Amino acid sequence: MGHVVMENRNGLAVAGRVSQANGTAERRASEAMLKRKAKRRGRRITVGEDKAYDSRDHVAALRRMNVTPHVAQNEALTKTGRRRTSAIDKRTTRHIGYRISQSCRAMVECIFGWGKLHGTMRKTKHRGLAAVGADFLLNLIAYNLIRIPKLAVP
């Protein structure tokens, strides 16, 4: 399973990782990649994520790392008819930055779409995390190289 961290201003991939698919792979990969980014920045950063990341342990881990989680609230109905409770409260959702992060996070799908359409992410020809990870990172680099000239001001 491939994971990407994208910066919101230009839509460039700034980190990527491949992991075995399990129930918590996305959240753990997000925490690992963001820990490196937050440590380098030194100040608080924000991260926009979809509602699969709305769990109390993940949100608490991000806050401990000095990362503001702009996670989509998962308040869907369960099979028994109960409403889920979100780990994101009004302290976060009331700010304009939350709405901006939620609108920008859809751009990460462009990275995966480009990799499947033009890159080699449609069907891997490799075995093992190391080989698949190298191919995945090569796709991210190629995406950035294609994207950068489009960002240049004429």
Image (cartoon, grey):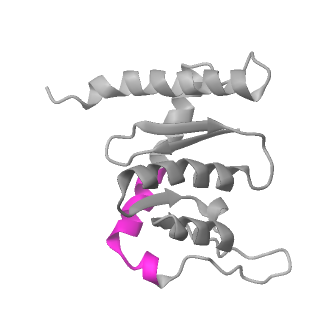
In the image, residue 40 above or below residue 12:
below
In the image, residue 39 above or below residue 111:
below
In terms of image quadrants, where is residue 43? bottom left
Where residue 21 sits in the image (x, y, percent)? 78, 43
At x 46%, y 66%, the residue is 66
Give the quarter of the figure containing the N terminus. top right
In the current view of this chain or complex, which residue is farthest to the right? 80
At x 44%, y 76%, the residue is 93
In the current view of this chain or complex, which residue is farthest to the left? 154
- Say left or right for 36 vs 79: left
Q: Is residue 71 visible?
A: no
Number of marks in the image? 0
Q: Which range is magenta?
A: 91-105
**Is residue 103 part of the magenta span, yes or no?**
yes
In terms of image quadrants, where is residue 107? top left
At x 69%, y 73%, the residue is 76
Where residue 129 sits in the image (x, y, percent)? 74, 29
